[in-house]
Amino acid sequence: MSPLPHRALRALERFHAARPWDHNAHFHRWILRQLPGRVGSALDVGCGSGDLARLLALRARRVHGIDADPEITARARELTPAATPVTYTAADALTGLGEQSYDVITCVAAVHHLPFEPALKAFRDHLAPGGTLVIVGVARERTPVDHLFGIVSVPLNLVMALLKSRGRPVPRPVSMTARTRPADLSFTEIARGARVVLPGARLRRRLLWRYTLVWRRR
């Protein structure tokens, strides 16, 4: 049974339809704070329409975005100024990474679309020595702590929608992302698997239905 009455859920849906905002983009500046001041190369896995890839170009001499959806990568190219050192490829995130290694790899709200541990191994193997991996992910709520974070996120989500729109209805964001599906793994399962593949990884539950993972390769 839904924790909120049906009428309340419909009201929330109407509210957010009038005031959409990008939950993933909310973490982009936080991602930049996890990175060195300047790096040679960066890879954004599940790049969507390239918002984060273009931000990474402020830190990296070369940025590559990869996404399984050709329409989205075409849109990313359209939105990226010609002088920006960012390229895009429509390819599978596990088989399309090629042979190159990167100083930075980011993945936002995309790793739950992939086999989790194989994806982490692929990211690890393509990270250069001293490189940084940053993941912002989505987990399935299973434990009381998970549900508590979800409950607290509901009013915060309302506040953020008001702040982002400054109280006025706004059009939907221009950025495009792939069709999403629910996460299969809980945060506990994610943390257990990540620490096997990426010893020393730092994981945190976050509000707004996200978790973060940061790992630096020695």
Image (spheres, rainbow, N blue to C red):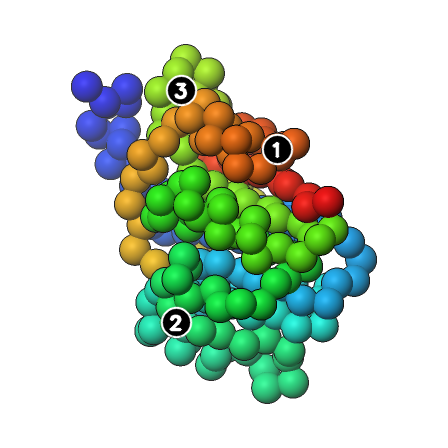
- Residue behind mark 2: 90
Q: Are marks 2 and 1 in contact (CB under 8 Å)?
A: no
Q: Residue drawn 40% across and 41% down?
A: 116
Q: Residue drawn 43% across and 40% down?
A: 117
Say which of marks 3 and 1 sits in front. Answer: 1
- Residue behind mark 1: 199
Based on the displayed image, in which of its 4 quarters is residue 61 positioned?
A: bottom right
Could you tell me the amino acid type at mark 2?
Answer: Ala
Q: Residue drawn 56% across and 53% down?
A: 125
The label number, if any, that marks residue 147 in the structure image: 3
Label 2, label 1: how many angstroms apart (C-alpha)? 30 Å
| x, y percent for residue 177 | 39, 59
Could you tell me the amino acid type at mark 3?
Answer: His
| x, y percent for residue 54 | 60, 68
Q: Secondary structure at mark 3?
A: helix
Left or right: residue 25 compared with residue 102: left
Residue toward you, 109 or 208: 109
Left or right: residue 117 compared with residue 199: left
| x, y percent for residue 52 | 57, 61
Label 3, label 2: how many angstroms apart (C-alpha)? 36 Å
Q: Is residue 103 above or below residue 78?
A: above
The label number, if any, that marks residue 5 in the structure image: none
Say which of marks 3 and 2 sits in front. Answer: 2
Residue that extends furthest to the right in the rendered view of this protein:
37
Q: Are marks 3 and 2 in contact (CB under 8 Å)?
A: no
Q: Secondary structure at mark 2?
A: strand
Residue 103 visible in the shown view: yes
Residue toward you, 136 or 100: 100
